[in-house]
């Protein structure tokens, strides 16, 4: 870690050198206090980037559009340390540190403050991330690193906060249609109306494609969302949302008895309301209430022709519900102090006879108390101390504290250091699953899982240092994070004999995983028409028992570059490059060789009266097909065109 600190300070010195070398004055106090990008999802306090207790990547809506992304997963490829893949093209996943999380089950995702973490099966954010319309997004905030201190157990490895556009900014209509190779057919329609005191939006979208090459993974996704923003008084803001999505996708392998080709289906719907009330300047309260429902259908006959398996079905279907109430109070207890505290009450319920044999609705209640205190002992210093305490009805208590110190070395140059301890509470599935298979004679032919409810929370201790440098005269921003992470009590699969049957269970492993590494992102805008992004991650995982498989269970290096260029005549181009070194995904044993991908996009802007038009062509994997997740999974080069009208 000392080496990382020296490198960060050396980088600062090298970049600061031009000021002294050419005799220029350092930034003035006025420049120092100019408005910086403000983020909301780190400590629960609105903070500029140089005062947050952690490393944050911000992606705005213009960049999302110019990347040519079809979903949020495409966007997250440009966040340092994030890996995007999926066991097939219809089931994408994004994770920070793939060594620990290939399904997004240790990542928290919010859409306007509403968690989309699933209660069903293994949990995770995989389907929730698919259910947001890119055209509605204002920005995406990604905290790179654990944030259980602010948002509890599900934020074990980080937080993705998606902020959608205020309805007052989307009045009018928008239509977008995309079509191209591999069955790509996407469309979006949106209409907004109202006044500054009451504005509304309805948006709908559809996405479809044929998936990966030589894999049965076609997908069809449709969604409908409504949002209202009301301002009954100058001190009150009310947001109401409702929506739902339906997704069907191909899964399985031809001829595989335990995982045959089939077409699962998933439906979800939600209601969400939030009321913010400003008491006095610098003090406000927030109340929110949400209700989410999920329904999964995934059933197919077991293909073994032997009589004993007659009538046996493979079934992973069921229903899940989640209701949550949250209260939050932000205030300033004294000069140079700011504080936020609050409580969260959550009720989760699951019904799935195939996954929880002989049981009706299962439920889990959670209570959470959180708080963060920001202190400025000196204009150059910012101290953040926070913690979350939570209690669940199935596991018990867990506490996640954090202490982070930010130091403004000179205007525009900030270093930070801190320590965080997090815990991830096991899911209902990890505690209560009971999967049995019976034939038509009601005979037990297989018993794959019966959890004994002995899983303890996973623990993560993180020490990190960071550096944020802003060089406004150069149009340059550099963000560096170095980390030392120790994970203990990892939840893993184990087994025991239940009578004569060997049954699967979940238990805590005794090994401790050490992860050391650094990552950085560079944002440079040398001219008004040119922007360059570069992100890099280098990591080393130290396992107690080394093997060829786990030696590469995360890439030792990954890079992402993006060049945005505006051209004369209302043309614009985007060229991106991503690369990962040799790796395996967690739970897999086939090592993927180094992979790289090049995407290109060209767009033309036009205007016809009040109608704004954009025509674009995007080529994904322009450099050629590459492997994803497994050696048999190939992302094939494909192109699609988009026509977008807004008026």
Image (cartoon, rainbow, N blue to C red):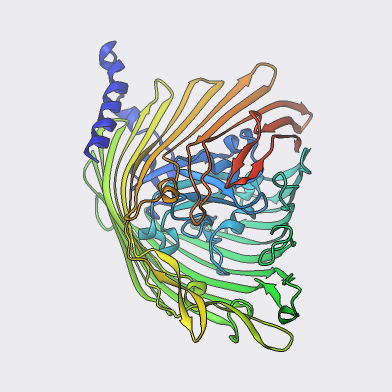
Counting from the top left corner in percent of width and height, residue 353 is at: 63, 81
Counting from the top left corner in percent of width and height, residue 235 is at: 48, 57
| Rendered residue at 47%/47% (across/down) | 142
| Rendered residue at 37%/29% (across/down) | 470
Image quarter of residue 127 = bottom right
Viewer-proximal residue, 542 or 162?
Answer: 542
Instruction: Work out whether 27 lies above or below 87.
Output: above
Viewer-proximal residue, 592 or 227?
Answer: 592
Q: Quadrant of the C terminus?
A: top right
Image quarter of residue 232 = bottom right
Q: Is residue 140 left or right of residue 4?
A: right
Viewer-proximal residue, 597 or 248?
Answer: 597
Q: Is residue 425 left or right of residue 617?
A: left
Counting from the top left corner in percent of width and height, residue 441 is at: 72, 89
| Rendered residue at 30%/25% (across/down) | 28
Counting from the top left corner in percent of width and height, residue 414 is at: 29, 36
């Amino acid at each position: 870690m000392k080496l990382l600190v020296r490198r960060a300070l050396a980088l600062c010195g090298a970049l600061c050198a031009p000021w002294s070398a050419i005799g220029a004055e350092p930034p003035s106090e006025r420049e120092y206090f100019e408005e910086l990008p403000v983020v909301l999802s780190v400590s629960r306090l609105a903070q500029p980037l140089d005062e947050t207790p952690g490393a944050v990547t911000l992606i705005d809506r213009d960049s999302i559009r110019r990347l040519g992304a079809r979903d949020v997963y495409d966007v997250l490829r440009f966040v340092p340390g994030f890996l995007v893949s999926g066991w097939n093209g219809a089931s994408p996943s994004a994770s920070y540190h793939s060594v620990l999380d290939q399904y997004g089950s240790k990542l928290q995702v919010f859409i306007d403050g509403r968690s989309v973490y699933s209660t069903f099966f293994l949990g995770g954010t995989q389907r929730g991330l698919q259910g947001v319309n890119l055209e509605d997004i204002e920005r995406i905030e990604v905290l790179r690193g654990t944030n259980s201190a602010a948002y509890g157990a599900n934020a074990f490895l980080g937080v993705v906060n998606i902020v959608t556009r205020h309805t007052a900014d989307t009045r009018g209509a928008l239509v977008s249609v995309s079509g191209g190779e591999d069955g790509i057919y996407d469309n979006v329609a949106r209409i907004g109306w109202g006044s500054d005191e009451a504005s509304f939006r309805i948006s709908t979208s559809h996405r479809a494609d044929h998936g990966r090459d030589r894999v049965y993974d076609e997908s069809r996704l449709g969604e409908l969302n409504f949002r209202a923003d009301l301002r009954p008084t100058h001190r009150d803001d009310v947001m109401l949302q409702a929506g739902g999505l339906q997704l069907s996708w191909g899964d399985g392998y031809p001829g595989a008895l335990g995982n045959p080709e089939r077409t699962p289906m998933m439906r979800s719907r939600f209601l969400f309301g939030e009321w913010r009330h400003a008491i006095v300047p610098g003090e406000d309260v927030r109340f929110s209430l949400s209700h989410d429902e999920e329904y999964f259908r995934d059933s197919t006959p077991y293909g073994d022709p032997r009589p004993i398996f007659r009538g046996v079905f493979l079934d992973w279907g069921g229903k899940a519900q989640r209701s949550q109430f949250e209260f939050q109070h932000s205030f300033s207890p004294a000069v140079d102090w700011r504080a936020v505290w609050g409580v969260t009450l959550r009720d989760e319920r699951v019904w799935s006879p195939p996954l929880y044999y002989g049981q009706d609705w299962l439920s889990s209640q959670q209570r959470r108390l959180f708080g963060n205190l920001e202190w400025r002992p000196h204009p150059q210093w910012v101290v953040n101390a926070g913690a979350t305490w939570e209690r669940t009805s199935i596991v018990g208590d867990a506490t996640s504290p954090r202490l982070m110190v930010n130091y403004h070395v000179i205007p525009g140059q900030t270093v930070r250091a801190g320590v965080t301890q997090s815990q991830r509470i096991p899911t209902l599935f990890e505690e209560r699953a009971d999967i049995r298979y019976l034939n038509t004679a009601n005979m037990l032919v297989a018993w794959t899982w019966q959890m004994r409810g002995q899983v303890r929370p996973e623990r993560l201790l993180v020490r990190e240092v960071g550096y944020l440098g802003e060089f406004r005269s150069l149009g340059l921003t550099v963000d560096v994070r170095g980390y030392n992470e120790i994970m203990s009590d990892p939840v893993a699969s184990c087994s025991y004999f239940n009578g004569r049957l060997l049954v699967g269970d979940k238990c805590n492993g005794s090994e401790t995983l050490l992860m050391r590494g650094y990552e950085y992102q560079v944002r440079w805008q040398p001219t008004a028409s040119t922007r360059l992004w570069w992100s890099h991650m280098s990591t080393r995982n130290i396992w107690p028992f080394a093997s060829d498989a786990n030696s590469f269970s995360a890439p030792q290096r990954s890079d992402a570059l993006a060049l945005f260029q505006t051209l004369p005549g209302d043309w614009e181009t985007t060229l991106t490059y991503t690369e990962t070194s040799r790796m395996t995904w967690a739970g897999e044993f086939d090592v993927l060789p180094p992979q790289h991908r090049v995407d290109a996009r060209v767009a033309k802007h036009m205007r016809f009266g009040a109608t704004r038009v954009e025509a674009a062509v995007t080529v994904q994997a322009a450099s050629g097909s590459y492997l994803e997740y497994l050696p048999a999974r190939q992302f094939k080069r494909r192109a699609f065109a988009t026509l977008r009208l807004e008026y």
